[in-house]
């Protein structure tokens, strides 16, 4: 995974999991987006690691 900003949908494709699982993990762990552009939430590398950790719980 390149060091870039990812949406939940792109992250789901990278990790090969359903987007719904990503969004549930984000909500459950109260993770905030690093950037919001045009209504889209983007997550940076450090936040992606937090999301991955939340998925494993």
Image: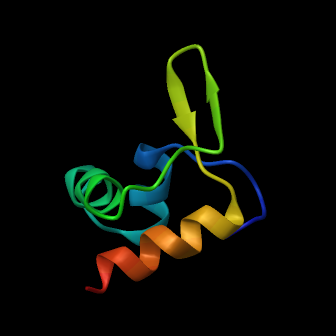
Front residue of 47/9: it is 47
Q: Quadrant of the C terminus?
A: bottom left
Q: Quadrant of the N terminus?
A: bottom right
Q: How many marks?
A: 0
Front residue of 9/36: it is 36
Percent across and percent down for residue 36 are 61, 28
| Outermost residue, front side | 30
Q: Residue at x 43, y 47 (%)?
A: 8
32 relative position to 53: left or right: right
Say above or below: 2 vs 6. below
Q: Residue at x 29, y 63 (%)?
A: 25
3 relative position to 29: left or right: right
| Outermost residue, right side | 3
Say above or below: 35 vs 22. above
Front residue of 44/9: it is 44
Percent across and percent down for residue 45 are 69, 65
Say above or below: 2 vs 38. below
Q: Residue at x 49, y 64 (%)?
A: 14
The quadrant holding residue 38 is top right
31 relative position to 1: left or right: left
Percent across and percent down for residue 19 are 28, 51
């Amino acid at each position: 995974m390149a060091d870039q900003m990812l949406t939940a949908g792109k992250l789901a494709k990278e990790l090969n999991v359903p987007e719904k699982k990503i969004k549930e993990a984000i909500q459950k762990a109260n993770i905030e987006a690093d950037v919001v552009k045009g209504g889209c939430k983007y997550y940076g590398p450090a936040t992606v690691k937090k999301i991955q950790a939340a998925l494993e719980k």
